[in-house]
Image: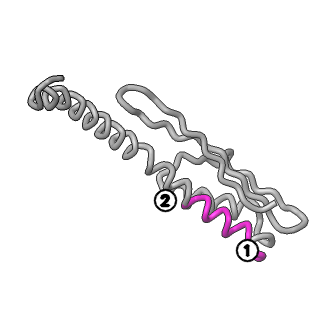
Amino acid sequence: MGSPSSSNGNKLPRIIAAGVVLILLAIVGALLVPPYAANWRLQGLVNDLADDPATAKQPPAVLRARVLNEAASLGLPVHSEDVHVDPTPSGVKIEVLYIVHVEIAGYTIDLHFRPEGGG
């Protein structure tokens, strides 16, 4: 068996490596959390619109504009053609499909989001 001082010397590189991994995970998390949080807020608006009985009486263009305005305020790359508003017998169905590009160390990650409500 080795002496206590030699076992401590073997642990130091592992501790440093673990610290580096944790820092890298924190950086990746910091880059990925904002788009997911913004999508969660957009999903909330879509749900609210789809659940509101007054929404069914509004023209699809008005609803599309409300979704686009909220997406823009959240900094999401949602375009008019990404928002689909369809009347249904029970109200309205709203679907949004968009992609957020996240750059991490020169590598692009495409996050695909599809908030929807109603139907």
Q: Tell me the amino acid under the disc marked 1.
A: Asp
Q: Quadrant of residue 63?
A: bottom right
Look at label 2 and name its amino acid: Ser
**Residue at 81% across, 57% down:** 86
Q: Is residue 111 left or right of residue 106?
A: right
Mark number for residue 108? none
Image x and y of residue 119, in percent: 82, 60
* Residue sitting farthest toward the bottom: 54
Tell me which segment is drawn in magenta: 41-54
- Principal secondary structure, stretch drawn in magenta: helix
Tell me the distance, in whole angstroms, between the alpha carbons under discs 1 and 2.
22 Å
**Against 70, is 107 above or below?**
above
- Residue 20 against residue 96 in the figure, above or below: above
Percent of width and height locating residue 29? 40, 44
Q: What residue would you read off at disc 1?
A: 52
| Disc with the residue nearer the chain's start (1 vs 2) | 1
Residue nearer the viewer, 87 or 30: 30
Q: Quadrant of the N terminus?
A: top left
Residue at the spot of label 2: 73
Let me know if residue 104 is in the magenta part.
no
The quarter of the picture where residue 45 lies is bottom right
Disc 1 is placed on an element classified as loop
Q: Nearer the viewer, residue 47 or 29?
A: 29
Left or right side of 119 for 18:
left
* Quadrant in which residue 25 is drawn: top left
Q: Is residue 42 shown in magenta?
A: yes
Residue depicted at 17% across the width and 31% down the height: 12
Query: How far across and down, in percent of the image, does residue 64 sit?
Result: 68, 58
Q: Comparing marks 1 and 2, which lies closer to the viewer? A: 1
